[in-house]
Every structure is written in C-alpha cells, then in structure tokens.
Image (cartoon, grey):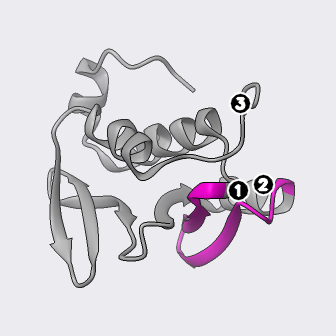
Amino acid sequence: MGLRTVRGVSVDEALRMVLMLPEVDQRLHGNHIGFRVRDKAFAYLCADDLTMLVKATREEQAALVEDDPRAYKKARASGRIGWVQVRLRKAHEDELGDLITEAWRITAPRLIVARADIPLC
C-alpha cells in the first residue's frame, strides 16, 4: 500500500472514509454498525468503537496481518473473501482508507464502480 501516515485513526475519520463512498448505507447489525452498498456488506464498526471489520481478498488479508499484526488481525475467510479486524488506534489512516475503498470496490456492482470518481488504490 502507499506511504504511511501517523498511526491511529479516530472513529470519526473511519466513518468519513466509509460514508464518502457512493451509495453506502448504514444500519445496525446486532451491536455493530454495518456499511453496505446495494445491500451487500463491506465493513462493520464494532460496538467497542475501537475496531472495524473490513472485507478484503484473502491475499490482502494475509499481507496486512503479516505486515502489521498490531493493527490488523485475520477475522474470518470464506471463498476468495477474507475479513480483516482493524484496530483503529494502531492503523495508519492511508492504509485504512485504501482497505475500505477496495472493500467497497469488490462489493459494489460493476456499474456503480465504473461511474464512481474514485482513484484506484
């Protein structure tokens, strides 16, 4: 991923990253806030406000956990998708922004992604 910024992302910063993406809605999912695009989840803010779960490819999941296990932890995996548990206070803002944007890209319908004016990570 890109150059790293200062470590630590606030809940407000994480929410801004998610909600700036096209056609995102949020809803309660148990004790978490789920973020969806066209009714498909790509991220969750956990009830503790300290962690997020973000969808990723298995390769991205493995790379993040290996590169920075203090910030990223393998949450679960199924098929080609892996979920990453992100410790917000340990994550880098630019890395988390890239991860959230890519999660949205692999979840959103192709037409929405094609129309979006979002630079590739």
| Label whose residue precedes the other's in the sequence (1 or 3) | 3
Q: Residue furthest right?
A: 67
| Label whose residue precedes the other's in the sequence (2 or 3) | 3
Please tell me how many numbered marks the rendered image carries. Answer: 3
Query: Residue drawn 25% across and 42% down?
Result: 109
Q: Are marks 2 and 3 in contact (CB under 8 Å)?
A: no
Please state the extent of the stretch shown in magenta in the rendering: 67-89
Q: Which one is closest to the eye, mark 2 or mark 3?
A: 3
Q: Residues within 10 Å of mark 3 (few under 14, many from 20)?
A: few
The x, y position of residue 24, in whole percent, is 20, 44
Q: Which residue is mark 1?
A: 59
Q: Secondary structure at mark 2?
A: helix
Q: Nearer the viewer, residue 91 or 80?
A: 91
Q: Amino acid at mark 2?
A: Ala
Q: Nearer the viewer, residue 30 or 36?
A: 30
Q: Nearer the viewer, residue 37 or 27?
A: 27
Q: Which residue is mark 2?
A: 63
Q: Residue furthest bottom?
A: 30
Q: Amino acid at mark 3?
A: Thr
Q: Amino acid at mark 1?
A: Glu
